[in-house]
Amino acid sequence: MPAVRHAAVQGLFYPSAQRELREQVEALLRDGAGEDLKAHPRPKLLIAPHAGYVYSGPVAASAYALLQRPDATPIRRVVLLGPAHRVWVNGLAAPEAGAFQTPLGRVPIDREMLDRIADLPQVIRSDRAHAQEHSLEVHLPFLQAALGDFTLVPLVVGDTDGAAVAEVLERLWGGDETLIVISSDLSHYLPYAKAKLADEATVQRILDFDARLTPHEACGSEAINGALLAARRHGLNPRLLDLRNSGDTAGDHDRVVGYSAIAFEA
């Protein structure tokens, strides 16, 4: 029986108790639903942050609130890409595990979709790359609350480039049943005023499809670069949902981390 990747940052980045976690996520989603959902198409691709919920949760929720559309085709699969923080990865790392666990339950891994990219030289298999990685895990409770049941294609993005990421995304693109999520924070540890200027410039480059971001600008830069190449090829339109930093949510202004939520719609 395939192994289960158990939650590594519950109790740190988000609550470990099921009821407390569900209540917090549902409250964030309610607060994030600040517009008429029918005013825009449901996004095909999202960029959302991955810090502790007290810091980036409200920003992430502005993206995930858009998924709660009973009038749309159900999302059955989520392709989730996030940067490697704990383990050096050569390319993109898929797990061997058969499911990811959070306090809200297990999410099955979509083995069929992982098989579609198994022959690509930039794709490796590594449970070690996923074991302690928070950049994917923190999105799962939001997805579980917003979508219910779905399968997961989780990829930790390491030493690679945007073109290699875009090649993977093309094979996983799917139709309306497939959502793509790119996990990334923006600038790290700049003073508040400098961070605002830097993050505004970075977000404008994303909105302009400039696929030349660096890790200095966004920790998930290569995943974003690949997503921009793929999104442009598929004719998606980006829309900024929220742009803040930890000084706006729960931290001081001396050294902040930037967060954005961006939706890409057909």
Image (cartoon, rainbow, N blue to C red):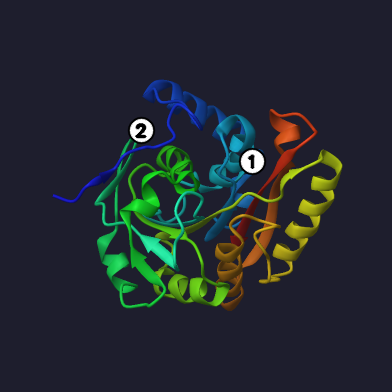
Residue 25 is left or right of residue 225, and the answer is: left
- State whether residue 247 is above or below residue 77: above
Marks 2 and 1, the one that precedes in the sequence: 1
Q: Spatial distance from mark 2 to mark 1, Cα to Cα?
A: 21 Å
- Residue 104 numbered mark, or none: 2
Q: Is residue 234 something one can see in this rendering?
A: no
Tell me residue 262's x, y (percent). 64, 54
Query: What residue sits 59% from the left and 52% below the top?
Result: 184
Tell me residue 135's x, y (percent). 50, 47
Query: What residue sits 62% from the left and 62% below the top?
Result: 221
Residue 117 is left or right of residue 4, and the answer is: right
Residue 209 picture quarter: bottom right
Q: Is residue 19 something one can see in this rendering?
A: yes
Q: Could you tell me the amino acid type at mark 1? A: Val
Mark 2: secondary structure: loop
Tell me residue 85's x, y (percent). 51, 50
